[in-house]
Image (tube, rainbow, N blue to C red):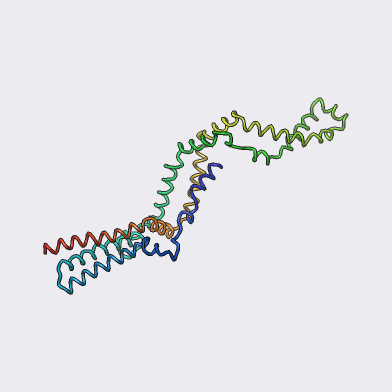
Amino acid sequence: MTLLNTIQNFYPTPWLVYTRPTLFQPQHLINNCPMNKSLLTNIIALALLAGGYQTDNQIAFYAGLFAFSGAITNWLAIHMLFEKVPGLYGSGVIPARFEEFKAAIKKLMMEQFFNEQNIDKFLSKEMAGEKTLNLEPVIAKVDFNPTFDSLVEVIANSPFGGMLAMFGGTEALQPLKQPFVEKMQQSVIEISQSDTVKDALKDQLESPAMMDEIKTNIENIIDQRLNELTPQLVKEMVQTMIKEHLGWLVVWGGVFGGLIGIASSFVA
């Protein structure tokens, strides 16, 4: 497996990174949807508010009022995080910072995963062992016929050319072509598997110029993948990762708001 193939496998397409929740899962509606927690919190807060107002219960009224204020404020803040609200500066921050989000992913990948040290470790690991850099499949596809033709041409132009002409010329050597090609191919395979060739390839791959080229290719792959992202997809990805915790922000906003409301009722 080459380094670039490893990168492509490690850094899949966005639609493999993000998968929308499967429909018709009961647990999804209960556990994974923050709006259900938000709605329940707001309903309880409004019930306390209405009940306290109807019964003239100051503690329940203040608890419901402050709980609803805390819950609805956090819900609005979460909504503004993902959606642009006209007239409210700073809303829709995730879609608005889409390009910065992509740049941050690229910076993370290049500095933490595909830095020069990690690439060098990868190359060293790939170069170690018997299965490293198996060039046999590549060599098998190489056409060695021109090497035989060049050899025949050299012989024909040498002092032995006149002697060869006495035995039929270059055509007399044609029966040797296939055995020569096979032997040449086998010799090249054996040479490619030698430690000398492996060390030479390793030195070349780890040279500054080659390292820069590898990093440039990696960067191009990452750019290509990131260009497939859209603001909507990024928004949905972030929502999927943190939606459960966003729901709890609304819940705890209501809880702490309610506690503050109870304390305020005693002060009032």
90 or 268: nearer the viewer: 268
Q: Quadrant of the C terminus?
A: bottom left
Q: Residue at x 49, y 41 (%)?
A: 215
Where is 42 relative to 178, above or below? below
186 or 44: nearer the viewer: 44
The residue lying furthest to the top in this view is 159
Number of on-image labels: 0
Where is 72 relative to 218, above or below? below
Q: Residue at x 15, y 61 (%)?
A: 263
The residue lying furthest to the front in this view is 26
Position of residue 257 measured from the top left corner of the image (x, y, whole percent) = 21, 61
Q: Is residue 42 left or right of residue 241?
A: left
Position of residue 259 measured from the top left corner of the image (x, y, whole percent) = 19, 60
Position of residue 89 measured from the top left corner of the image (x, y, whole percent) = 30, 60
222 or 127: nearer the viewer: 127
Q: Quadrant of the N terminus?
A: top right
Q: Quadrant of residue 52?
A: bottom left
